[in-house]
Amino acid sequence: MSDATYVLEFEKPLRELTMQLDALQQQSLESNLDLTKEVTAIEKKIDQTRSEIYTQLTPWQRVQIARHPKRPYALDYVGLLCEDFLELHGDRQFRDDRALIGGTAFFKGQAVMVIAQQKGRDTKEKIARNFGMPQPEGYRKALRLFKMAEKFNLPVLTFIDTPGAYPGIGSEERHVSEAIAVNLREMAMLKVPTIAVVVGEGGSGGALGIGVTDRVVIFENSYYSVISPEGCAAILWKDGTAAPQAAQALKLNAATLLDFGVVEEVIPEPLGGAHYDLAAAAESLGRSLQKHLKDIQKLSVEKLLEERYARYRKLGIYEETLVSS
């Protein structure tokens, strides 16, 4: 899954060392020289540099990894973790939104409902998937599938990966805010176990529209935020180039979300990001989903709803002040 043609700015020192290693190995083959000592030295330097880079990532660098064009998307994980995924289309009101997909599948032998935001790889697919930004009909399709899952007593697994809901004129005309708001309300009352996983970007209400679940887990190089770094920078600093500063202020770090109780678990990724080893990332996710699903399936419906309500009531910090008239 790694892509040698796409290198993030902070990865360039590692890329240069890798090119040196390739050149040295090629020279050894062409000249029939024993360069084992030199090759070993560069390999050691590569390992050291890789560790230094990826164990000290800033929030902005993690955002860049979350947006990496080769980062695994929802369907990549569904394909590895689930069997017999059957996609269901349409919201029964307007049309089918390909940015938000859903359907039935089997996870570890158990029937589940899968709902996911899906981005595209090439230009044609990106346009078809609307760059992973759902429109109102996407959220209404998700709501239809939530209700179907409840009817047939299927646990729900949602995969979050969007910069946000689509903000275009058509989306606003068809009431995207209302569609998301209805999902928030209805997900809070679903009588089946629900788990959300943030696999890439988790932007604003677009992510929350399928994220009001019993448990939320997140990959270590993903982010989950009320606004994108660029949007925050444009509002606070009137300058989109202040995105790195905004990412720092927004604390876009999965470990911070765990400390705040926003997520229940941070799923580790292969060094460098999930795109370096999709199978390992999927295996870690599978273990996490299985563990959390097993825990919440033990609860009665009454207890499930009670704990879900308590989970969201305790998020955030606020103060009450008496103001004299």
Image: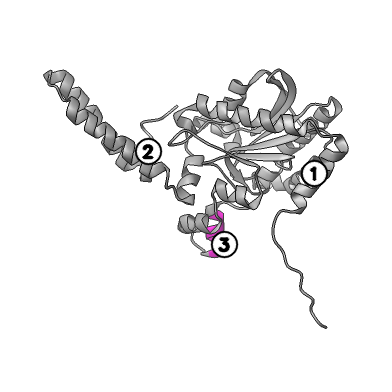
- Residue 305 percent across, percent down from the top left: 83, 41
Question: Is residue 99 shown in magenta?
Answer: no
The dot on residue 307 is 1
39 to the left or right of 221: left
Residue depicted at 42% across the width and 44% down the height: 55
Q: Looking at this view, name the residue that lies furthest to the right.
A: 302
**Separation of residues labelled 3 and 2 (CA atoms):** 29 Å
Number of marks: 3
Which structural element holds mark 3? helix
Q: Nearer the viewer, residue 101 or 122?
A: 101
108 to the left or right of 76: right
**Separation of residues labelled 3 and 1 (CA atoms):** 36 Å
Q: Amino acid at mark 2?
A: Val
- The reply to whether discs 3 and 2 touch (Cβ–Cβ < 8 Å) is no
Q: Amino acid at mark 1?
A: Glu
- Residue 223 percent across, percent down from the top left: 56, 45
Q: Nearer the viewer, residue 276 or 215?
A: 215
Q: Earlier in the sequence, mark 3 or mark 2?
A: 2
Q: Earlier in the sequence, mark 3 or mark 1?
A: 3
- The reply to whether discs 2 and 1 touch (Cβ–Cβ < 8 Å) is no
Q: Which residues are magenta?
A: 230-236
Which structural element holds mark 2? loop
Q: Amino acid at mark 3?
A: Ile
Crowd rating for badge 2 (residues with CA inside 10 Å; few <14, some 14–19, many 20+):
few
Residue identified by numbered label 3: 235
Q: Main secondary structure of the magenta part?
A: helix
- Residue 21 percent across, percent down from the top left: 24, 30
Q: Earlier in the sequence, mark 2 or mark 1?
A: 2
Q: Nearer the viewer, mark 3 or mark 1?
A: 1
Q: Nearer the viewer, residue 203 or 178?
A: 203
